[in-house]
Amino acid sequence: MTILVTGGAGYIGSHTCVELLNKGYDIIVADNFSNSHPESLKRAAELTGRLFRVVQLDLQDKCQVEELFSENEIESVIHFAAFKAVGESMKNPLKYYQNNLAGTMVLLEAMDRFNVKKLVFSSSATVYGKEADIPIAEKEEIGAANPYGRTKQMIEEMLNDLFQSDPKWSIAVLRYFNPIGAHKSGRIGEDPSGIPNNLLPYIAQVAIGRRDQLIIHGDDYETKDGTGIRDYIHVVDLAKGHLKALEKISYTPIYETYNLGTGKGYSVLEVVEAFQRACGRPIPYTIGTRRAGDSAVCYADATKAKNELNWAAAIEIDEMCEDIWRWQQQNPEGYASVEETAGVKEATGA
């Protein structure tokens, strides 16, 4: 039996593929490569010494998705595939609703038809409202403040409805906080297209010389140094959380949500200082105005994941920054310098 990983060529998806392969799982990756690079999968195969199938498809294509299920004995699905930039979702909400919701509905219909009812869903801490108590626990009321977060919230509600209608389904919803870091080898990491939306890839690109300086959005919050505080989790810790969730859904039908975070908060300036230690050079920055919708403090209560999944984040902020810097040094332009060829299929046994 095989695990289908949708969006498996992306940042979190590719690291999860490595962990799955290292644990002996057989996988199939489905990705349309609209915001990812086939090279990440070639490197995942190299890192693990495992071959796996890669299928280029769009989840909104019902015929392609059903063909994928009909041709393979799929046991479970880990669903990453989605557009994920908050700012872009506010400028182009219909793009997000069409891709994230429609693609998920086609996937779920195919899973139901082929009796594949085990799912780990990639959600987000953006589903929580701005007034949530800190640290944020799963019991907090959800109320996403942007279209990207609302697509995740709507899918969560869709999945809950599905489970209530048919308790044969087993679904783990994972609400991520702020994934950062890279594989220890430096071979795979975060490679955002265009200007990075997130703090750490932006800092890394400043350090490597691709960008002039970091803009810190506000230093007048009621925090220890005036900058916003967030929960940063290493992407490998996050990937391992998916394996724990996969184990959970494999032996008992459930619908459960789990926060995946460290339970610690670091300010923007603390992260800048940690990255300066990692790269051994100053990170020039300037202070800008606050961004609309940003909260002062946001970090997780990850107790439920510890108690029910036997999972906890282990990697600290300095090591996270060291891993990012290793990736950035080895790949100053990300995957962009790698010539795209059909070799990804050969390397992965597709």
Image (spheres, helix red, strand yellow):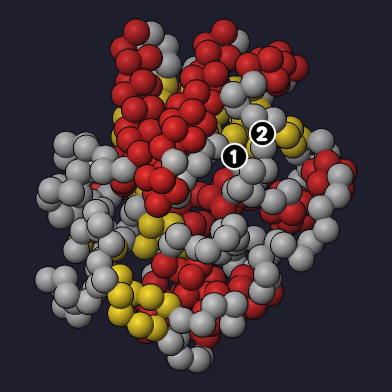
Left or right, residue 107 beside residue 122:
right
Residue extending farthest front: 91
Q: Position of residue 35 (x, y in %)?
A: 61, 48
Residue 333 appears in the rendering: yes
Which element carries disc 2, helix, strand or loop? strand
Horizontal side of 3 relative to 178 (left or right) equals right
The residue at the point 22 percent across, 76 percent down is: 219
Image point 38% across, 33% down: which residue?
151
What residue is pinned by disc 1? 7
- The reply to whether callout 1 and callout 2 are in contact (CB within 8 Å) is yes
Amino acid at pointer 2: Ala
Between 170 and 193, the one lying in front of the other is 193
Furthest toward the bottom, the residue is: 281
Where does label 2 land, which residue? 30
What residue do we see at 53% from left, 64% from top? 195
Q: Position of residue 190 (x, y in %)?
A: 57, 60
Image quadrant containing the C terminus? top right
